[in-house]
Image: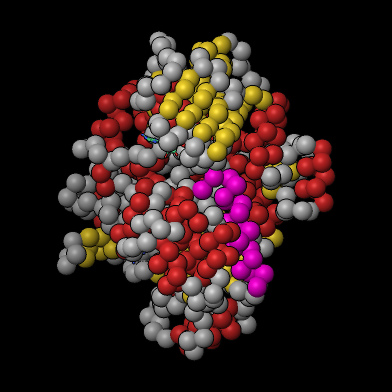
C-alpha cells in the first residue's frame, strides 16, 4: 500500500519551476497521470493508484513538500481518518478503558490530537473514505475493545473532558477569578480537596490573566478533574511544572482512574508518563504525513521499546539509533580545566531574595540546574548572562556567553535561515553541526519560514540552535525542553552533550525533565529555599550527591531501569521507595 502526502504549505509551484514534480515524474513522461494539476487550487495532486513510488518527485521538489511511503498492506484496514486527498493519514486508535490511564508517546504531528478528537466525539472519522455515520465506525471496530466505547459515544452516554495542551491560551478564552472558574467547574463537589491537592489556595482570588504558566496548568487540571465525566483527556499535563508538581499531578490523575474513569494522556516527560500510565501506545510515522498507533504495551516495556527505536511486536524500526542512559561517573569526562570561578552573588527583588554560593565551572561539562519553581534559577542564569545586575557581588569575567532565555520572543523580521546565518553561516554548512544539531532538530525544514510565524515548538528549536551555533565559552539554556516533544527532547539532549564534549565548552541548563537531566548532566546545581520568598544556590556538585539532596527535599526516589539505564520514579510508599529513603539513596541504587 502506497500513500502520497503533499504539504501544501510548503509547495510553491511558481518557485520550483512551474510544477517541477509533474514534469519529472516518469509515469507522466510516459503519458500516464501519476501527478495531475488541480487548476482550481493551483496545486499538484498525486494519484496513488498510478504512482509507482519511484521517489523522483520527492527528491526533486526543492521545498521537501512531498512524502511517498510504502506501508504494509495489513495497515489498510486500520485506516481511521484521512484529512483529504494527499493529506495526513491516521492508522489505528488507542484503547480507552474504565479504571485505566492510557499514555500516548510519540512526536508531534503524528495524529495524537486527531485520535483524541475522535474519541471525544468531536470528529467523525471518515475511515479513509466517505464515511458519514458512527454506525459505520462501530462496524469497523467490531470485535475491538473500542466497539462498546463508540456505541456509548453514539448514544450520548459518554461525556468527555479535555485539559488542553496550550494552557497559556486560557486567559484569552476565560476571564475572571480562579475561584469563580473552579466553582463553576465543580460538578463533583470536590472543590476544597482539589484546591488543596493542587496547592491553589494562594491564587484563588487572583485574576486568571495574572497567573504564571505553572499556575495556569494546575488550574486547568483542577477544572478538568472537577467535571463529572467518563472520559478525561490530559494533553501534556506537566508543562511549566517543577518535578514535585509533576509527580503530584500524576498522582492526582491516577486517582481519577482508580475511581473508575477512563483517562488518556499525552506526555513528553518520560518519567512522568511512566509514573502515570497503566499502558502506553507508541505513535510512530512521519510528522505531518502519517501516524500509526502501536498495540497497547506495558508501560515499562513500551518506553524501553521507544528508547530503542524498535517496536518488537510490530517489527518496526522507527529511529536508526538507540537512546541509552549512562551514569555520569561512567562517562569519559573531559572536564578538568576550570573555565571560571564565580563569586558569592545576591539578588534582592524586595519580595524575593536569592543568595548564590560561590562555585566553579569546568570546561567540557554540562551542569544542570534543578529546584522548584520560583526559587531563583532564572534569576541566577540572568545574572551570569549579564541581563540582571546582582545586588551584591559582581560577574566581571571576560567570558563569551550565549544565552537562551526561558521565554523566547519571535520578534525577528525575516526567515529562520536569515536569523541563523547572521549568527554563524559557516556552522550551517559544517558537517558536525549538521549531523549533531541541525538535522536532528529538523532545522533545515524551517529555513524558509518567517521567524514570527513559527509555532512554540519550532521557535524553541530555532532558539536552541541560535544559542548553540554562537561562538561562546559558556552556554546558558533556560528550559530547553519546553514545547518540545519527546523525540525532540532526546535530540536536543544529544546535541548539547556532543557539542560540549567535542568543543570543550561549558553549558548550564535549567531543566525539570528528569530523563533529560540524567542524560545531559555531568554535575548538578541544586537550588533550595522557599519558593517566591528566598532561594539559595548551592555550588555545582556530583550527580549522586546533587540528586540525593534535591530529591530528598522533594520526597521522591528514583531507581534505574536495568535494560536502558533510564531513571524511573518509585511509587510512593512502595518497598523500594521506603528502602531507598531509609538509606538516603534517592537516586542511585
Ligand atoms: P499531534 O497531536 O500528534 O501533534 P495532530 O493530530 O494535531 O497531531 O495532527 C496530525 C497532522 O494532521 C498534522 O500534521 C496536520 O498536518 C494534519 N491535520 C490536522 N488537522 C487537520 C485538518 N483539519 N485538515 C488537514 N490536515 C490536518
Ligand atoms: P525560577 O526560575 O526558579 O522559577 P525565578 O528566578 O524566575 O525563579 O523567580 C524567583 C522569584 O523572583 C519569583 O518569586 C519571581 O516572582 C521573582 N522575580 C523574578 N523576577 C523579578 C523582578 N524583575 N522583579 C521582582 N521579582 C521578580
Ligand atoms: Fe513544485 Fe514541490 Fe509543489 Fe511539486 S510539490 S509543485 S515540485 S513545490
Ligand atoms: Fe511520479 Fe515517482 Fe513521484 Fe510517484 S513517486 S508521483 S511515480 S515521480
What's the residue at 57%, 35% (across, down)?
529
Which image quadrant for residue 315?
A: bottom right
Name the outermost residue toward the front.
350
Residue 95 in view, yes or no = no
Q: Nearer the viewer, residue 570 or 505?
A: 570
Residue 297 location in percent, x, y? 67, 61
Query: Which contiguous range is marked in magenta?
Result: 241-259
Left/right placement of residue 562 relative to residue 197 reads right
Residue 380 location in percent, x, y? 46, 27
Residue 40 in view, yes or no = yes
What's the residue at 28%, 41% (across, down)?
410
Which image quadrant for residue 556?
A: top right
Left/right placement of residue 421 relative to residue 480 reads left
Residue 548 location in percent, x, y? 70, 34
Q: Nearer the viewer, residue 184 or 420?
A: 184
Residue 456 location in percent, x, y? 37, 47
Q: Nearer the viewer, residue 497 or 262?
A: 262
Which image quadrant for residue 87?
A: bottom left
What's the residue at 54%, 55% (across, down)?
199
Q: Is residue 160 magenta?
A: no
Magenta segment's dominant SS is helix
Q: Quadrant of ligand 1?
A: bottom left
Q: Nearer the viewer, residue 273 or 175?
A: 175
Amino acid at each position: 500500500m502506497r500513500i502520497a502526502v503533499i504539504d501544501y504549505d510548503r509547495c510553491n509551484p511558481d518557485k520550483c519551476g512551474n510544477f517541477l514534480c509533474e514534469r519529472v515524474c516518469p509515469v507522466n513522461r510516459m503519458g500516464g497521470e501519476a501527478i495531475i494539476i488541480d487548476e482550481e487550487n493551483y496545486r499538484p495532486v498525486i494519484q496513488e493508484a498510478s504512482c509507482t513510488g519511484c521517489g523522483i518527485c520527492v527528491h526533486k521538489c526543492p521545498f521537501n513538500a512531498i512524502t511517498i511511503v510504502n506501508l504494509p498492506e495489513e495497515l489498510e484496514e486500520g485506516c481511521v481518518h484521512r484529512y483529504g486527498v494527499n493529506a495526513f493519514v491516521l492508522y489505528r486508535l488507542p484503547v480507552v478503558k474504565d479504571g485505566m490511564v492510557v499514555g500516548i508517546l510519540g512526536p508531534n504531528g503524528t495524529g495524537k490530537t486527531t485520535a483524541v478528537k475522535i474519541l471525544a466525539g468531536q470528529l467523525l472519522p471518515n475511515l479513509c473514505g466517505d464515511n458519514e455515520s458512527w454506525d459505520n465506525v462501530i462496524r469497523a471496530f467490531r470485535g475491538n475493545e473500542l466497539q462498546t466505547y463508540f456505541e456509548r459515544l453514539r448514544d450520548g452516554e459518554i461525556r468527555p473532558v479535555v485539559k488542553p495542551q496550550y494552557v497559556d491560551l486560557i486567559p484569552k478564552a476565560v476571564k475572571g477569578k480562579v475561584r469563580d472558574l473552579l466553582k463553576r467547574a465543580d460538578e463533583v463537589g470536590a472543590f476544597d480537596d482539589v484546591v488543596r491537592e493542587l496547592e491553589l489556595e494562594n491564587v484563588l482570588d487572583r485574576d486568571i490573566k495574572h497567573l504564571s504558566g505553572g499556575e495556569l496548568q494546575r488550574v486547568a487540571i483542577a477544572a478538568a478533574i472537577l467535571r463529572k465525566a467518563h472520559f478525561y483527556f490530559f494533553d501534556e499535563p506537566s508543562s511549566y511544572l517543577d518535578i514535585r508538581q509533576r509527580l503530584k499531578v500524576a498522582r492526582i490523575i491516577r486517582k481519577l482512574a482508580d475511581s473508575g474513569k477512563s483517562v488518556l494522556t499525552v506526555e513528553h516527560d518520560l518519567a512522568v508518563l511512566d509514573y502515570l500510565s497503566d499502558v502506553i501506545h507508541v505513535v510512530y510515522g512521519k510528522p505531518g504525513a502519517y501516524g500509526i498507533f502501536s498495540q497497547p504495551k506495558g508501560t515499562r516495556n513500551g518506553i524501553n521499546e521507544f528508547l530503542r527505536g524498535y517496536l518488537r511486536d510490530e517489527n518496526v524500526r522507527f529511529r536508526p539509533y538507540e537512546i541509552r542512559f549512562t551514569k555520569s561517573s561512567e562517562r569519559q569526562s573531559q572536564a578538568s580545566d576550570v573555565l571560571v570561578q564565580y563569586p558569592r552573588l545576591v539578588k534582592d527583588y524586595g519580595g524575593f531574595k536569592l543568595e548564590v554560593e560561590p562555585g566553579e565551572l569546568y570546561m567540557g561539562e554540562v551542569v544542570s540546574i534543578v529546584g522548584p519553581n520560583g526559587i531563583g534559577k532564572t534569576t541566577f542564569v540572568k545574572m551570569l548572562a549579564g541581563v540582571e545586575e546582582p545586588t551584591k557581588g559582581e560577574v566581571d569575567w571576560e567570558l563569551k556567553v550565549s544565552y537562551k532565555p526561558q521565554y523566547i520572543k519571535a520578534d525577528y523580521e525575516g526567515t529562520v535561515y536569515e536569523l541563523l546565518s547572521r549568527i554563524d553561516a559557516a556552522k550551517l554548512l559544517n558537517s558536525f553541526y549538521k549531523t549533531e544539531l541541525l538535522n536532528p532538530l529538523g532545522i533545515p525544514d524551517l529555513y524558509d519560514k518567517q521567524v514570527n510565524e513559527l509555532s512554540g515548538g519550532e521557535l524553541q528549536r530555532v532558539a536552541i540552535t541560535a544559542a548553540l551555533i554562537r561562538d561562546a565559552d559558556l552556554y546558558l539554556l533556560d528550559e530547553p525542553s519546553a514545547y518540545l516533544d519527546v523525540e525532540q527532547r532526546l535530540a536536543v539532549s544529544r546535541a548539547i552533550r556532543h557539542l560540549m564534549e567535542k568543543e570543550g565548552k561549558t553549558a548550564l541548563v535549567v531543566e525539570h525533565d528528569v530523563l533529560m537531566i540524567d542524560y545531559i548532566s555531568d554535575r548538578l546545581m541544586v537550588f533550595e529555599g522557599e519558593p517566591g520568598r528566598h532561594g539559595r544556590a548551592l555550588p555545582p556538585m556530583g550527580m549522586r550527591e546533587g540528586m540525593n539532596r534535591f530529591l530528598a527535599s522533594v520526597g521522591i526516589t528514583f531507581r534505574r531501569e536495568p535494560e536502558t539505564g533510564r531513571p524511573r520514579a518509585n511509587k510512593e510508599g512502595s518497598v523500594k521507595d521506603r528502602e531507598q529513603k531509609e538509606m538516603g539513596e534517592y537516586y542511585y541504587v
